[in-house]
Image (cartoon, coloured by chain):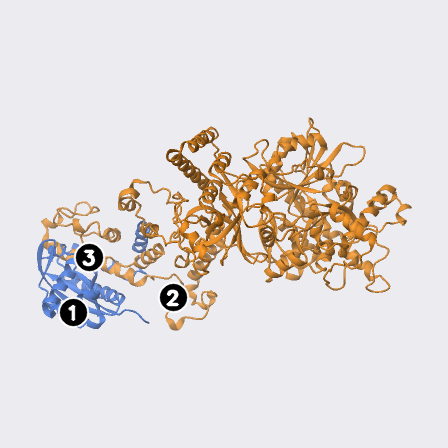
């Protein structure tokens, strides 16, 4: 197929103070990426950033970010990501670093990876739980995010929201 | 376009998770749509309330406020789990749900796709079939709303079977009236819906020039049965007094003209609303008096009017004659002549009974529709008419009976110098029958034969008809001559092959010569104008007893010698007809009596029986288009087109404007003519009223100016004028139809040295001077005059071309006689283009208030309401600026018809000019250039010189 090809990077924003994460927004992340690239690769890099760089998705609760780079130069841009040490958002400097988890050709593959990764993470914290209540909660969440075929009610709930939106 | 794009994008993004983040106050407005999506998703799970209150979101759960502060350690795992789980859910939804197109098979991998899957759900894997069939039903439902599928249950053969075809035709005739020659025309013509009829506009073959040639040298045939005939019966005096309210002697001979009253000439008048002569014209009608019968003062008058005029004319006639008592048609059996005809014609029964069954239903429906409007008789096909709409009105006080004979008679028009030879060749005077005397027959002809006097009259008429054969051209007969006749069924003498009817002039003898001269000078003797067609009973009798084509062919097949003439002629085949001479070009000096011809009036039902024999005599057939061209060549106004002051003309103008605008809008904007740039204010209509008002203002101003500047005696002449006009403020413009005024104008327009006979004809007219012009203007302030323009150089005038007054420099240009030079209009600027574009963009965004704030100055102060309905690119929006002074040359009027005239060999146009403007122009022109004006097409910048003519 003839289309404009991109690379989607699934990154995780790691912060020391988790409540700082909530301050983030997509423009701040994009700005941080831009400034890092400009710092590393100069004007050329800055120009590349202006092509099609965008933050497609950002979850402030766990710091997941989808970044879109043009396919032709994604490696160059990617190479600047480790140099991001803090993100300025809402007038605050948030010290953080970006950890790239996955590189995909479509958003869809990234989403699929994210599903797998998240379930994995949930399963990983289950043994680390400290009390029964917490354990129960995590168990419940794991059950919730099993493939939708098992969880009818939640699915229907989702469709209700769709209707509201329309 | 954009709306659908947005919609598609919405659908695509519906399931995609949006970023989960807190909006800052500054960014709130920008990403509102995202927030909406986010909110909905967020509410699915419990999440941490924000620690700061600055950007708290609305829908947080209860009890979350203090949660985090108290147990910061505890949170991490739970919040982590929760956020992960929520994200997983959102992502799962995004991954599993299909996006974009909603065809089921698009969810399949490519290798599982099959050809025509959307057509046949069985080609899908079974698990998808349910969904697919559901989708299919949905789309079918949506499709059925747009177009309903046609129930073509019957085969073509069944549909084309005679009875079924007849049913179908009857069904189709319920909406529009069909002429009797409809099927013949429909096979050969472009049909149009007009005035409630379905009429042939122009033939599908290319025959513009052949038709013109036929008109000027042979014969052209038109079916004008759609003209409406209204019959008035009553005492001569009462009729004349009633009708005299409608007409005025100033416009020419009225209903009471002696020649017409005797019944041997057809007359034509322009009818006005009762007693309102110069204003409120209705339109032109032709009329025909029945010759006086001995011993009875009662007279019969037929008024033939255009169908567009009938709805105005009929109520007016009723008012004038005080005929308000509608006479309900007495008996129902009259309404079903098809039934009675069927018994005689031995038509197969099953065909007729469904027809009879169907038609009443249709009629009832139509009569209900018609109840609100003026009562009009509708004809269904061949002679079936609605039984309950009144067609007759009578008056108890005046004793006049008005009878609406619409579609009761067939009228064919033969145009051209050889139309008489076509007639004489195809028709034969009826042979009298001796056998009929013995048997008492229900047919009219045997009874007619018994009367000696009537037979004598018939002999005389046949004699005249024979003499008609000898004349050279149809134009030689006195205009309007009427000849009554009874003829044999023309189908019997149908030639085997199409032959061209040629005149037979050479066999002249002394006696014939004398008769011919009589005919040419005096016309038909008054006695011979009588015809049985005037009798309702005879007409009905003839219509009912028509031999069907089938029967005729059966009789022919029984002949011993195939192809020989049927003899004796069947008794049913005698038809009373009326031949009415149509005058040709009567005005002007050249090409006189061009387009003269005969009208053939027949009882209804006999249309096709006469049509085909006429066609077999080599005539050309034309439609509405050619009849318009005929009147243009003839220099006569054509009814709805050239009567802008009549209600029918106004209606026609509106229709025409809508049609032209629609046609204009159908072009892509880049390919449209920008009329604004061409300086054409009204390319699709002619705002006569505005023109006349502007000219009145102009002349008044000029008159005031002159009065102030010029010498005393002139001032004395000038001063009474404004008072004159002030006393009668006419609000509506009129067309000058008074002969005296027209003659005066005509004399003024003519070049002083042009024609030899001019001094003789225009001798009575005062020379063109300021005073005379002012005196004339005083009585015709709000008038336009109908003029004929012939171009002096090349060029073809088009519809709604502007007539402009030349400047003195232009006239100098004309003096040089340099063929290539003609004045030009400088291109105008289109200020509306940007507005149109901006408006378009604005409507795309839906930003209404943006516009009013955008326009500074005058535009903003004016409310933009007028431009709201339609701001079409290239056409001026509705309140037009000053018409007269819009271009570099002053506009006088417009063209209503224009074309290259094949008879004159140059462009010719008919149009109207404002009288004030015309006189102003004439006064300012030097003698040798009198009557020269400029003509400019709407889509051109070139002015062409034209000579103005007013012909009386």
Q: Quadrant of residue B424?
A: bottom right
Which secondary structure lies at badge 3?
Answer: helix
- Characterize the local packing of mark 1: few (<14), some (14-19) or many (20 or more) Cα atoms within 10 angstroms: many
Callout 2: residue from which chain? B
Q: Which mark is residue A77?
A: 1
Query: Which residue matches tag 3?
Result: B83
Chain A shade: blue
Chain B shade: orange
Q: Quadrant of residue A97?
A: bottom left
Foreground: disc 2 or disc 1: 1
Q: Are marks 3 and 1 on the same chain?
A: no
- Characterize the local packing of mark 2: few (<14), some (14-19) or many (20 or more) Cα atoms within 10 angstroms: some
> Of the residues under marks 3 and 2, which one precedes in the sequence?
3
On screen, residue B540 versus residue B591, left or right, reads right
Query: Which residue matches tag 2?
Result: B106
On screen, residue B678 versus residue B470, left or right, reads left
Foreground: disc 3 or disc 1: 1
Which secondary structure lies at badge 2?
Answer: helix
Give yes or no for contact between labels 3 and 1 (Cβ–Cβ under 8 Å).
Answer: no
Q: Residue furthest right?
A: B438
C-alpha gap between disc 3 and disc 1: 29 Å
C-alpha gap between disc 2 and disc 1: 35 Å
Q: Position of residue B78 (x, y in %)?
A: 16, 56
């Amino acid at each position: 197929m003839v289309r404009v090809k991109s690379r989607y990077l699934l990154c995780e924003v790691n912060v020391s103070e988790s409540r700082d994460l909530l301050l983030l927004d997509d423009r701040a992340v994009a700005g941080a990426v831009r400034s890092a690239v400009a710092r590393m690769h100069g004007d050329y890099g800055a120009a590349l950033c202006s092509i099609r760089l965008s933050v497609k998705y950002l979850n402030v609760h766990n710091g997941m970010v989808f970044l879109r780079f043009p396919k032709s130069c994604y490696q160059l841009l990617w190479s600047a990501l480790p140099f991001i040490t803090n993100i300025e958002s809402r007038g605050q400097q948030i010290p953080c670093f970006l950890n790239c988890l996955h590189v995909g050709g479509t958003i869809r593959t990234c989403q699929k990876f994210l599903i797998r990764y998240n379930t994995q993470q949930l399963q990983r914290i289950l043994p680390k739980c400290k009390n029964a209540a917490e354990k129960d909660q995590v168990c419940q969440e794991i059950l919730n995010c099993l493939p939708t075929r098992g969880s009818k009610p939640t699915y229907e709930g989702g469709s209700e929201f769709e209707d509201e939106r329309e | 376009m954009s709306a659908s794009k947005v919609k598609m994008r919405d659908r695509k993004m519906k399931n995609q998770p949006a970023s989960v983040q807190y909006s800052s106050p500054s960014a709130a407005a920008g990403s509102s749509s995202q927030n909406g999506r986010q909110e909905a998703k967020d509410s699915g799970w419990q999440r941490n309330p924000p620690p700061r209150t600055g950007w708290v979101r609305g829908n947080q759960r209860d009890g979350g406020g203090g949660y985090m502060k108290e147990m910061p350690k505890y949170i991490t795992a739970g919040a982590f789990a929760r956020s992960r789980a929520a994200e997983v859910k959102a992502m799962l939804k995004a991954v599993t749900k299909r996006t974009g197109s909603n065809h089921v098979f698009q969810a399949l991998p490519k290798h599982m796709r099959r050809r025509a899957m959307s057509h046949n759900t069985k080609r899908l894997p079974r698990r998808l079939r349910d969904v697919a069939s559901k989708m299919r039903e949905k789309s079918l439902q949506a499709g059925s709303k747009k177009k309903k599928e046609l129930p073509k249950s019957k085969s073509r053969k069944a549909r084309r079977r005679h009875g079924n075809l007849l049913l179908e035709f009857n069904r189709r005739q319920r909406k529009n009236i069909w002429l009797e020659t409809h099927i013949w025309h429909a096979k050969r013509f472009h049909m149009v819906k007009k005035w409630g009829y379905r009429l042939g506009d122009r033939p599908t073959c290319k025959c513009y020039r052949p038709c013109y040639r036929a008109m000027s040298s042979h014969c052209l045939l038109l079916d004008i049965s759609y003209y409406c005939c209204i019959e008035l019966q009553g005492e001569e005096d009462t009729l004349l007094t009633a009708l005299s309210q409608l007409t005025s002697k100033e416009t020419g001979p009225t209903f009471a003209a002696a020649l017409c009253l005797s019944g041997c000439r057809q007359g034509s008048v322009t009818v006005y609303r009762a007693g309102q002569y110069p204003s409120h014209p209705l339109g032109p009608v032709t009329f025909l008096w029945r010759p006086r019968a001995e011993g009875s003062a009662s007279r019969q008058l037929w008024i033939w009017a255009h169908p567009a005029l009938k709805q105005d004319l009929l109520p007016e006639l009723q008012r004038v004659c005080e005929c308000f008592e509608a006479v309900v048609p007495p008996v129902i059996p009259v309404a079903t002549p098809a039934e009675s005809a069927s018994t005689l014609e031995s038509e197969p029964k099953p065909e007729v009974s469904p027809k009879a069954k169907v038609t009443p239903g249709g009629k009832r429906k139509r009569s209900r529709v018609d109840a609100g409007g003026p009562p009009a008789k509708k004809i269904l096909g061949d002679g079936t008419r609605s039984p309950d709409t009144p067609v007759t009105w009578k008056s108890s006080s005046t004793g006049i009976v008005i009878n609406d004979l619409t579609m009761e008679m067939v009228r064919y028009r033969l145009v051209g110098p050889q139309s008489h030879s076509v007639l004489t060749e195809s028709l034969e005077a009826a042979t009298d029958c001796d056998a009929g005397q013995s048997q008492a027959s229900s047919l009219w002809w045997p009874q007619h034969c018994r009367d000696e006097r009537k037979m004598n009259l018939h002999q005389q008429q046949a004699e005249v008809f024979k003499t008609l054969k000898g004349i050279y051209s149809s134009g030689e007969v006195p205009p309007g001559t009427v000849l009554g006749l009874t003829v044999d069924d023309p189908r019997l003498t149908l030639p085997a092959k199409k032959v061209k009817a040629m005149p037979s002039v050479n066999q002249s003898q002394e006696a014939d010569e004398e008769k011919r001269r009589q005919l040419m000078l005096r016309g038909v003797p008054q006695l011979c104008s009588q015809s049985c067609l005037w009798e309702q009973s005879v007409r009905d009798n003839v219509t009912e007893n028509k031999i069907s084509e089938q029967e005729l062919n059966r009789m022919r097949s029984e002949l011993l010698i195939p192809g020989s003439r049927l003899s004796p002629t069947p008794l049913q085949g005698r038809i009373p007809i009326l031949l009415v001479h149509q005058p040709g070009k009567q005005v002007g000096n050249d090409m006189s009596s061009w387009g003269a011809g005969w009208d053939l009036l027949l009882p209804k039902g006999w249309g096709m029986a006469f049509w085909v024999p006429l066609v077999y005599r080599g005539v050309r057939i034309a439609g509405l288009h050619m009849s318009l061209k005929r009147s243009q060549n003839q220099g006569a106004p054509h009814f709805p087109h050239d009567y802008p002051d009549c209600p029918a003309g106004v209606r026609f103008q509106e229709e025409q404007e809508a049609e032209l605008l629609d046609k204009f809008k159908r072009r892509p904007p880049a390919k449209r003519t920008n009329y604004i740039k061409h300086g054409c204010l009204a390319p699709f209509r002619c705002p006569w009223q505005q023109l006349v008002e502007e000219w009145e203002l102009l002349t008044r101003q000029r008159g005031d100016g002159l009065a102030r500047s010029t010498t005393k005696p002139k001032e004395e002449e000038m001063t009474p004028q404004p008072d004159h006009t002030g006393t009668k403020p006419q609000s509506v413009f009129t067309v000058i139809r008074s002969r005296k005024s027209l003659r005066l104008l005509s004399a003024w327009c003519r070049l002083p040295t042009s024609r030899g006979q001019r001094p003789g004809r225009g001798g009575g007219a005062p020379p063109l001077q300021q005073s005379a012009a002012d005196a004339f203007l005083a009585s015709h302030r709000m008038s336009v005059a109908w003029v004929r323009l012939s171009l002096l150089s090349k060029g073809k005038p088009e519809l709604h071309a502007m007539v402009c007054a030349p400047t003195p420099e232009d006239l100098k240009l004309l003096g040089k006689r340099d063929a290539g030079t003609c004045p030009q209009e400088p291109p105008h600027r289109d200020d509306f283009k940007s507005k149109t574009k901006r408006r378009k963009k604005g409507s795309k965004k839906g930003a209404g208030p943006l516009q009013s704030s955008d326009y500074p100055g005058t535009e903003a102060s004016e409310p933009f309401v007028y431009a709201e309905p339609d701001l079409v690119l290239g056409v001026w929006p509705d309140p037009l600026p000053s018409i007269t002074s819009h271009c570099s040359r002053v506009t006088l009027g417009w063209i209503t018809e224009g074309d290259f005239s094949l008879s004159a060999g140059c462009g010719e146009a008919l149009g109207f000019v404002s009288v004030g403007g015309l006189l102003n122009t004439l006064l300012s022109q030097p003698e040798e250039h009198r009557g020269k004006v400029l003509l400019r097409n709407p889509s051109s910048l070139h002015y062409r010189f034209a000579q103005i003519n007013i012909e009386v």
